[in-house]
Amino acid sequence: MSVPLVDILSLSGALFALGIFGVLTRRNFILILISVEVITNAAILNFIAFSFYSPGPAAGGITGQSIAVILVGLAATEVAVGLAIVLALNRLRGTLNVAEAIQLKF
Amino acid sequence: MNAETFTFIVLALGAVLSGALALLSREIVHTVIFIGGLFADLGAIYFVLSSPFLGLLQLAVYAGAVTILLMFAVMVIKRRIFARESTLGIQVPTLALAVIVGAVLVNVAMDVPNYGPAPSCPAADPYCVGALAQNLFLLNGAWLVLLGFIMLSALVGAVHLAREWRTPSVRRIRED
Amino acid sequence: MQVPVAAYLPEALALAAALLTFLMDAAGVRQRVVVGSFSVVLYVLALISVLGDLSVAPFSIFATVPKGLIDTGAVGPIQFSSFGLLWQAIFLSASLLVAFASLSEGEGEREVPIFYGLLALATLGTLLVGLSADLIFLLLSVEVTGISTYVLVAYARKDARALEASMKFYLIGALSTAISFFGASLIYGAYGSTALSHLRDLPPSATVGGTQMALVGLGLLTVGLGFKVTAVPFHMWAVDVYDGAPDHVSAYLAAGSKKMGLLAVLVVFAASVSIFREGSAWALYVAFSGLAVVTMTVGNVLALQQRTMKRMLAYSSISQAGYMLIGLAVATPASLAGTTIQAVAHVLMKGGAFLFVAAMASIGVGNRIDDYRGLGHTHPATTASFAILLLSLAGIPLTLGFVGKFYIFASAVQAQGLFIFLAIAGLLNSAVSVFYYARVLRIMYMVEPQTSSQGRWTPAVAHLADPGAGSTPPSAGSSKGANLGRFRAEIQALGLARWSAIVACAALTIILGIYPTPLIDLANNAAAHFLATGP
């Protein structure tokens, strides 16, 4: 493992920004969900990177990869629930456009 | 620059590119394909970062299961919804916000010292899979228990929401 | 020290409530009375156990956590602190309130066990937040409640508005989880560990750089958890979700799941605030003070303009979160105690108020504030309770809401310096909030009920006119017998469980408002230990 930490963190930063951009601009449920998954992947990448470059005691180390494993499971679970909600909604209505589904009132 | 770093940079550029294409393409099926590419690309990156177990997990769960789940949802729903993104114009303020967030994070990355690499794995366990298992199942077993609760809740919820209705009053609403 | 298995009794009871309820569903036992009472009994047992651990007088024989474990630091990812236990009691009261009042809901075909089971899982998540001493453990516990509540909002399945609310809630929740975990990854990078106790010291890498990473990580964590607390500008989802969700689920979201977000923020930041107190503290103080002021002001101003009851209550709930965030910005034992008291008050006030809305909706009263006209004459007991809860929300003396607010503002004044401005902003906001609460009171009491010719009102009035033996109109019931009959009719119309839950909320608000000493002692003790020994 000899990739510099800066490179990995820059990639995860870029993915995070991409995800935020997607969440803020897209209006389709599935596209927003995908943007959120991109953010989660940036977090997973960070945890893996810090499992190799760790400032703390030895306890740091491999823990990062454990968290990454947990996060992969968590994200898959979340997607499943989201799609169940969407399928239930789809049965009632024909739209998946978030802006159309609920009018934001301020 | 050594071979590993070069491979990483090529894969990283590929990841950002497929991520951007996924969010910019008009056809939602293309989006799902590109996002599958992004997940697979990240899996390859984990292999380069010498965490093959996570690479496999990423390929199986993200590039495999999640992508197929998304594709399935698109296929089931597509007939009735806007499959296309209705507003595709790139709003300048949002783009600026995203660029600022990215710049801050890259700046943070620059600020971080290149900590010495963690102690390497023993020869008998070259990729630390044994150490990972110990850490995951013994030291941090509580996290797995919590993940179990989350999955229980998700399972019950998803089954309940996806279950068909039988009462006649509902059909009337559906026909509206 | 080894943790005995019995120490996890409250969590085990919540899990048992969930699993056994799902089993009942599988076995075909779906009567609301059976399933609901089972949950209620288990919550009561768990509450007794938690109160026992807190050594509250009559219950202390039921303590299951050894005294040596409380407030003595973390055991792995878990910690038993009196602060966490006190908040567990708050969460359990919220769940108990909602589960009990829901006994009066109608029979759904298959939804009843799912509702109670998911409510129990959500409760389990909130209880685990009270135990956590590890950042990842904390975020995963938040997620247990998160996933359960997404589905809980949509559990009726046939209500398109609820499903839309659930979809929105889900998207915001998933986003907040992703951002929180990204922040956690930066913190893990800066500290090399996820134990919350490490956040009390500067990161080990501070000598060579990396504080910036810790700060950005904490900032992203604020954003992620800010969504759960409904701090402005992360509040947009809350009103639509509270509005669209089934009424008793809204009660749980406001009373239970929001408190959980608040505790998560407290646990993460009350620890780290102390390290930033030296040196570059101002950035964090400014951030939290700004968040508190903006949250309460925006919440109040928008509540003023609402025409429907649920949206008004949702916005006022946002402004209440602002008052509680003052406690975090000041971060002294007194201010945290104030936040805790206010949280207790908030469970009673918001839980009771949303349950009142649910009760009124069940007898056909509309959703607009104007639809509540004259309820004081037809439903005296519950309307009086609702009025008390509203007065408590406004912070009128002799109510628990006043005690909590007073404690928070006094702690801000005590802390001196610029914190005085927080107290002033809070007082001004309280004054503004009186307007919209008073408007509701006026409509309920000063305005005569609509005549029965106007559709929506008919069922309630007809029902109430019955026991008055036909001859006595409800508004002229001056004799004792007619009054008693009116109460009986009210209970009959609303359901005994819901009626008594609403009245109990108001009664507790008054009792604890007049005699708050035990609660204040508990909160002070817990907050002092919390700041001294760890999250």
Image (cartoon, grey):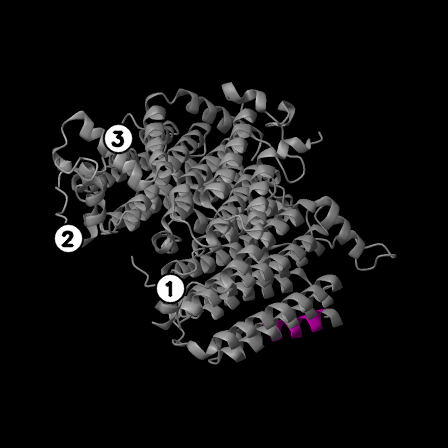
Residue in front for this viewpoint, C233 or B77: B77
Task: Please tell me if label 3 and label 2 are on a single chain.
Answer: yes
Q: Which residue is mark 2?
A: C454
Amino acid marked by disc 1: Ser
Which mark is nearer the camera, 1 or 3? 1
Q: Residues within 10 Å of mark 1 (few under 14, many from 20)?
A: few
How far separated are the C-alphas under marks 2 and 1?
27 Å
Magenta stretch contains residue B7: yes
Say the numbered circle drawn on residue C396.
Answer: 3
Q: Secondary structure at mark 3?
A: loop
How much space separates mark 1 and mark 3, taking CA atoms?
A: 47 Å
Residue A39 as seen in the image, left or right of residue A21: right
Asked if the residue at tag 2 contacts the one at tag 3, i.e. Cβ–Cβ closer than 8 Å, the answer is: no
Which residue lies at the image location 54% right of the left edge and 39% below the top edge? C127
Nearest to the observer: residue C195 or residue A4: C195
Q: Is residue B8 magenta?
A: yes
Have a look at marks 1 and 3 and say if they share a chain.
Answer: no
Rendering coords of residue C278 (x, y %)? 51, 36
Residue C534 image position (x, y, % from top left): 57, 33
Callout 3, which amino acid?
A: Ile
What amino acid is labelled 2 in the image?
Gln
Mark 3 to mark 2: distance in Å?
Answer: 35 Å
Image quadrant where one finds the C terminus of chain B = bottom left
What SS does tag 2 mark? Answer: loop
Which span is picked out in magenta?
B5-15
Within 10 Å of disc 2 (Cα), the crowding (few <14, some 14-19, many 20+) is few
Where residue B169 is drawn, which disc sits there?
A: 1
In the foreground, C376 or C452: C452
In the rendered image, the quadrant that contains the N terminus of chain B is: bottom right
